[in-house]
Amino acid sequence: MSRLTSLPKSKDTYGLTHTDFHQSNFYLYNGDIYLFDFDDCGYTYFVNDIGITLCYALFYPFKEFENKTE
């Protein structure tokens, strides 16, 4: 923990993140990503959002629904 807490924090590496970026929290439209559901936001390293997104993508693959109301 001491090594992790000693990592440098700069405006390029640390700040406000979504922290819950997964398939149910964004919408794709015309090649743009619209992110929503910001109730889990927090201050951490930006790489955290990449790790969480990859974790969700690998362990919970996207499922396309024919009936969009599902």
Image: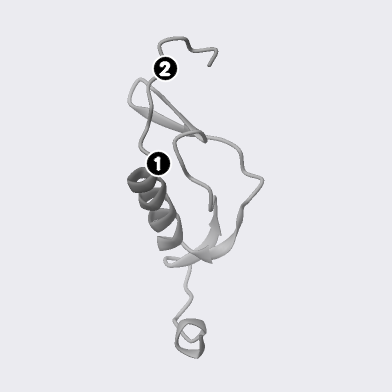
Q: Residue furthest right?
A: 39
Task: Please say which color scheme the image uses.
Answer: one colour
Q: Residue at x 48, y 76 (%)?
A: 9
Question: Where, by quadrant of the figure, is residue 37 drawn?
Answer: top right
**Amino acid type at mark 1:** Tyr
In the figure, 61 relative to 19: above or below?
above
Say which of 16 and 47 sits in front: 47
Residue sitting at x 51%, y 90%: 2
SS type, badge 2 = loop
The answer to whether the residue labelled 1 contacts the one labelled 2, judged by CB atoms less than 8 Å apart, is: no
Position in image of residue 40 (x %, y %): 63, 51
Mark 1 to mark 2 CA distance (whole Å):
15 Å
Mark 2, residue position: 65
Residue 29 rendering spot, x and y as whole percentages: 40, 21
Q: Residue at x 62, y 43 (%)?
A: 38
Q: Position of residue 57 (x, y in %)?
A: 36, 44
Q: Which residue is mark 1?
A: 60
Crowd band around label 2 with a 10 angstrom C-alpha radius: few (<14), some (14–19), many (20+)? few
Q: Is residue 15 left or right of residue 57?
A: right
Q: The residue tagged with tag 1: helix, strand or loop? A: loop
Single out the residue that lies furthest toward the top: 67
- From the top left corner, tell me how far across and down residue 3 is, in percent: 45, 88
